[in-house]
Image: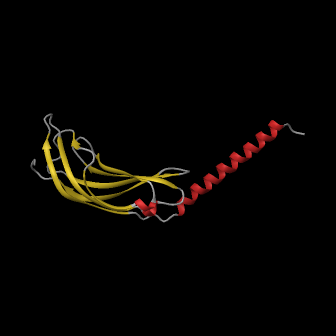
Amino acid sequence: MHSFGYRANALLTFSVTALAFICAISSFSDKFSNQNPSAEIQILNINRLKKQSYGNDEVSLTLDISADLQSLFTWNTKQVFAFVAAEYETSKNSLNQVSLWDVIIPDKEHAKFRIQTSNKYRFIDQGHNLRGREFNLTLHWHVMPKTGKMLADKIIMPGYSLPDAYK
């Protein structure tokens, strides 16, 4: 006969192994979901393009953001973190990314939205490289599952530019 401790240990080990196996299978099932998010971002207005007192350029934009991220939600999705970033090149850096706006989407019902807003975070370049600069607006998202690996992807929207003169 085995002792109570030995039996409890065997039962606990089996339970944890079975739970890990179920979590792995459920996480793997997300690979078969059809994800086709869509987004469109328009710049409604460039509110301000100015040179700050210590030499950096700062831009304030009014954005019209519409997105349908409902296809990212499966039974295993806890929430989705989405953000819009301005991405551009300078002579010093091949990629500059500035986060302009973000949102945490808790469920599928809130994953289709349209919002008109000014940039939530300051669009500042270290230096005076923003005048006349072409840039991309990119919608990034991170899918946070209940179990398994966090997934990230993005939609790049090119073809935006800033004015040549300060406003």
Q: Identify the image quadrant of the N terminus.
A: top right
Q: Quadrant of residue 115?
A: bottom left
Position of 66 with respect to 4 (left or right) is left
Say how the picture is coloured: secondary structure
Q: Nearer the viewer, residue 107 or 26?
A: 107
Q: Position of residue 144 (x, y in %)?
A: 48, 51
Q: Which residue is found at the position 27% from the left and 50% from the top?
A: 86
Query: Which residue is at a point 13% across and 44% down the rendered structure image?
Result: 50
The mark tally for this picture is 0
103 and 161: which one is in front?
103
Hey, which quadrant is residue 111 in on the image? bottom left
Q: Is residue 142 visible?
A: no
The residue sitting at the right extreme is: 1
- Whether residue 34 is visible: yes
The residue at 69%/45% (across/down) is 16
Residue 52 lies, with reference to residue 112, above or below; the image says above
Foreground residue among 136 and 147:
147
Furthest toward the front, the residue is 109
Q: Position of residue 148 (x, y in %)?
A: 55, 50
Query: Is 72 on the left or on the right of 43, as rendered?
Result: right
Give how far across and how far down residue 61 sits, in percent.
Answer: 20, 52
Determine whether 52 is above or below 103 in the image: above
Q: Residue at x 15, y 51 (%)?
A: 47
